[in-house]
Image: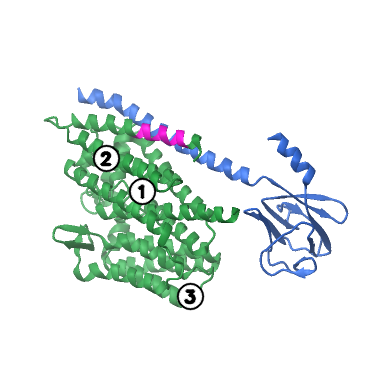
Amino acid sequence: MYEILAQIVKFLLIGLIYYFLYNFLKLMVLDLYEERRSSEETVYYLQCEDGREFPVRSVTTIGRAKDSDIVIDDPYLSSKHAMIYKKGRKMIIQDLKSTNGTYINGKRIKRAVALRENDVITMGSRKFTFLRREARGLERGSDL
Amino acid sequence: MDSREEAIYNKALAAMALMGFLSFLLLSIYRKPVSLVPFYGAITFLTIVFIGYFFTGWIFPNSDKFLFILAGFLAELGLIMLCRINPELFKRQVAFFAIGVGFFILSSILTKYFVRLDVAPFYFWAATAALLLLPLFFGVERGGAKNWLVFNGFTFQPSELAKITFVFYLASVLKEGKVNSIYRLGAGILAVTGLLALSKDLGGAMLFYFTALTVIFAATSRLDLAVGGILSAAVGGIISYNLFDHVRVRIEAWLNPWRDVPGRGYQIVQSLFSIAEGGYFGTGLGLGRPDFIPAVATDFIFSAFAEEFGFLGAAAVILMYFLLVYRGIRIALRLNENFLVLLALGHTVMFGMQIFTIIGGVIKLIPVTGVTLPFMSYGGSSMVMSFTSLGILNGLWQRALEGEDDDEA
């Protein structure tokens, strides 16, 4: 009697264990989704002297390396030159120990500093202006 | 809190409650005469889980319920196996679980409000060393390792508490992201590992050493230290294999348990038979014969579980431990200050290493060393201290969320 019962319950128990696990895996997927959402684009972008525009995400790496978010083919840049990231509402730029340095409005930065609008970032021989995308921001707002 | 997450937690809790009722009702009619002790135990257990769940939710509105429910479920699976193996141990384990939940809440509060960043690492090291020295002088020997303290009938394993102080030591000594004095750090770690090896707690020594290596590598990203550490571990292993008898016994039982089945290889062979007997779906609760394995309630509970719940159940348990480690790493990634990051990482790595050491041991992937499986094995110190570590992770999660709010303001 007990054996038959145990045999039946065994499948139920394994089913329950997997149902529990399924719920927790779903939570993990939700976590990852949240991470991705927070790594979406911000309202800022970098404008190069030649007119090209690069969107800034909440973590953006700049350099010669092909896997950088902003790839700039310039011999004066390091392969991983600098990083711009979002902290709260501020955008922070940090030099990644590059050879030729990163300059904000002509001053070389040593530690992470907060960026303001219209700051001019110089890396190697390139100049970028840090700008806010007003019009597009509104468009996106109406999207939501 | 997100309502979608809340709904998922509620479903998981319902699955947990149903699992508890079904299996403990089954266990109530397992022994003749029929006794309702397992069922009352289950009700007590579930009550503690729900009180713990709502209480933490009440004092910390964004408490990390993920960790608590997952640990509770693992404890439930462990209790089911214990109740089937030995009802006396089961009763005591329910009490330990209650104490563990208490410590979980206590250490969450302490970590959230009272963890200071500026305590000198030496104090943590001294506490660790003192905890490990105590049993060498006043301890008693159980299961081949002299690491138990006895106060009038109540036993305690200080090395479980030393795990926590040791992680604090590592985090505080490495909080600047560099090794200030490699000799002092090396001497500190080797002294702790040596003390564990002296009390013949080989699993503990391995656990502490590899946790230290991982935390050092995470803090400094220096490959030379990691490679040097692994090489010196290999050298130390070879030396102790040739010098100490108890090390040789374990390694030989691992390499070829079939040579001496009734003697040295008995435990591991029984464990392997047990796992093999389970097949995919297991023999069914109460229909296997895990009682043949020595120390089945503590170190080898995983083999007993694998026998009665099969490969599928065992794989699910391993996945749950993975999720626990994943969540710990996620907490570490969210924190800002180096000390707190390393603290969260250290506790997570300690869990991960411990799980790997014992599950790897019982399936003969690595030599068997006597460490407990967190939350599942029988043992008061292990249960209470695992919950304390988890509480520290929960407290750190609170601090991570707090830090983000500060930035927003």
- For label 1, the SS is helix
- The residue nearer to you, when weighing A91 against B307, is A91
Give the foreground label among 2 and 3: 2
| Marks 1 and 2 on same chain | yes
Q: Which residue is mark 1?
A: B359
- The residue nearer to you, when weighing B318 against B231, is B318
Mark 2 Cα shell of 10 Å, populated few (<14), some (14-19), many (≥20): many
Amino acid type at mark 2: Phe
Mark 1 Cα shell of 10 Å, populated few (<14), some (14-19), many (≥20): many
Q: What is the drawing colour of chain B?
A: green
Amino acid type at mark 3: Ile
Tag 1 near tag 2, CB within 8 Å:
no
The residue stretch that appears in magenta = B6-16
- For label 2, the SS is helix
Image-quadrant location for residue B82: top left
For residue B9: magenta?
yes
Residue B275 at least partly seen: no
Q: Furthest-left residue in view?
A: B33
Q: Which residue is mark 3?
A: B182
- For label 3, the SS is helix
Q: Which residue is mark 2?
A: B45
- Distance, label 1 to label 2, CA atoms, is 25 Å
| Marks 1 and 3 on same chain | yes
For residue B21: magenta?
no
Which quarter shows the C terminus of chain B? bottom right
Amino acid type at mark 1: Ile
- Percent across and percent down for residue B387 are 34, 51
The chain ID associated with circle 2 is B
Q: What is the drawing colour of chain A?
A: blue
Give the foreground label among 1 and 3: 3
The secondary structure that dominates the magenta segment is: helix
